[in-house]
Amino acid sequence: MPVPKVLVGLGSCGIAAGAQAVYTYLHDTLPPEVATVEVTSCVGMCYAEPLVEFVHGEERVLFGPVDRNFAEELCRNIQQGILPATHRVQETGEGWAYLSQQVKVALRNCGRINPEKIQDYLDAGGYEALKTCLTRYTPEEVIAQITESGLAGRGGGFFPTGRKWSFLAHASVKKGGYKYLVCNADEGDPGAFMDRAMIEGDPHGLLEGMLIAAYATGARYGYIYCRAEYPLAIKRLRIALDEAAAYRFLGEHILGTGFSFNLSIKEGAGAFVCGEETALIASIEGRRGMPRLRPPFPAESGIRESPTNINNVETYENVPFIINQGPGAFNRYRSGKTVGTKVFALAGKVKRVGLVEIPVGMTIRELVEGIGGGSSTGRPLKAVQMGGPSGGCIPERLFDIPIDVESITATGAIMGSGGLVVMDEKTCMVDVARYFLTFIQNESCGKCTFCRIGTKRMLDILTRFTQGEGSEGDLLLLEDLANQVKKTSLCGLGQLAPNPVLTTLRYFREEYEAHSKEKRCPAKVCKPLIRFVIREEACTGCGACVRSCPVKAISGEKKRPHHLDSLGCTRCGLCQGTCTFHAIEVE
């Protein structure tokens, strides 16, 4: 039996947690005849990083979080032929709860292979689906397989993928022109990191999915549009492109057949609007990323006015699995009209932050409380924000609905690409709406008046609410503006921009009324609507708050209760954070 492997998770999350130092120590310390130390990516358990996995034959033991001290212990134990009993992530209650309820399809290789070595991908069955398509299926039969699987676009639109591919397959090409294929990896939602993690962990899975799509649709050239803020993802994509070309999976006459396809990377500048397909196409062509009216749709006129198809990373990552395992292996998971699995990025006030892949139909509560472990603060959960800035807020009382397109859409939110931000009771929903409208307003391309001006006016109103200057008339105006922007904006991003406002108005209207009528923030978040007070009975006069206050708004004699001048207070909260006697409260 070959020597064991020690895999160190060097995704962006692992590196941020200190995994590079762990990798360097293990690599330099473990003799190669004892164990080989390899790079892998994020397995999804970001909350437990840095992660190290010991692999020997069928045995796989995951350890985390691994610091330098435990890395030393792990090295000693491996050289002695034993493994430590501690830090075993999968054998803890948390690790079991996190992993046991997931179904890994798009994430099947993430954290299990070295993303920078094509041989690891081949050993895991990589490129077998492409070989099958080129030797056994006609392009029409490939599209039929994808159609039968029920795969729908995982970028947020959930349009049937097989149908979308058929549009491109039947599109007419001008003389001397080509069909184009694009991967949208321009992930701009706050709190979302699905595309980044999949590219960092399984770049060849993306390439294989795109190659199969190109064969099925007759595309000749392709682009992976990835934001420049993902340097590690881009680095691994470049390595994968070079390796795929060297193995003749990419380029001219692939695997000795008449099929040829070339891919290149287009680095995006980080404009949120370039997630919209016509704006993305404009950016690829070197123009300012701005949406245009449709029709014509990209399948008819896209890049260089040629037929073009766009899918996102997760959609393409599912394709090799469907070809290898059959459509039934994917659509066995079903809820309403939605089938398959869905990748989510869990973020916010949740214990187990990370990347998960679940079968559709699981409830929000099962995802957030079962897999995610519930509130990280100990306070009751209040809502989740799903679908990014153009998504919406779903209150805790609706957490028992299934996660599928119809059920989520009925709440006023959207599934989106998979960002899910968890909020507890200390979250101000008016401030949440203001935050997302700030993002939307800053990212508006400005082409259409309703999005450019409408979101600005909505943001102005929300800002007035959070500053204690809102009125009942503002509340009615805000709702009217939101509905008008939704109906009249040019592109999907503008049409969905009011969702954070409309859903918070729908489920948390009493918070808006408290801000406008009572000039009070129930969550005690909006600074102009709160004040700090010192409870005399709890204050010991230690002076810690006096020393921490940057504006000298606190005074008092030593060992006697202190006084806080509310007029001079800037509400920075430093005093409350300093007080170990919990004598400072927010009113």
Image (cartoon, grey):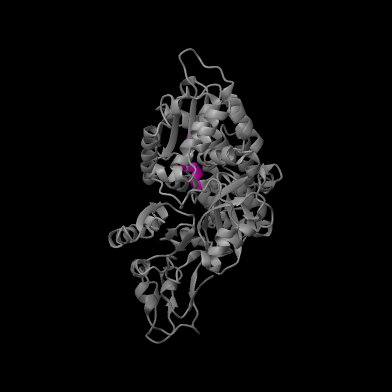
At a point 44% along the width and 83% down the height, the residue shown is 561
Q: Position of residue 45 (x, y in %)?
A: 49, 58
Q: Is residue 128 left or right of residue 161?
A: left
In the image, what residue occupies the spot 57% across and 31% down?
490
Total marks shown come to 0
Q: Is residue 456 left or right of residue 366?
A: left
Q: Is residue 524 visible?
A: no
Residue 351 vs 9, above or below: the answer is below
Q: Residue furthest left?
A: 28
| Quadrant of the drawing holding the N terminus | bottom left
Residue 430 in view (yes/no): yes
**The stretch drawn in magenta includes residue 392:** no
Nearer to me, 487 or 465: 487
| Residue that lies at the very extreme toward the bottom in this rendered image | 559
Q: Nearer the viewer, residue 229 or 244?
A: 244
Question: Quarter-wise, where is residue 296 in the image?
Answer: top right
| Direction right: furthest residue | 336
Residue 456, how many percent across, how many down? 51, 42
Q: Residue at the spot x=43%, y=72% of the render? A: 577
**As displayed, is residue 112 above or below residue 493?**
below
Q: Is residue 116 above or below residue 394?
A: above
Up/down of 392 relative to 400, above or below: above
- Where in the figure is residue 9, as x and y percent of width and height? 41, 55
For the residue pair 506 and 188, the one nearer the viewer reads as 188
Segment colored magenta: 438-445
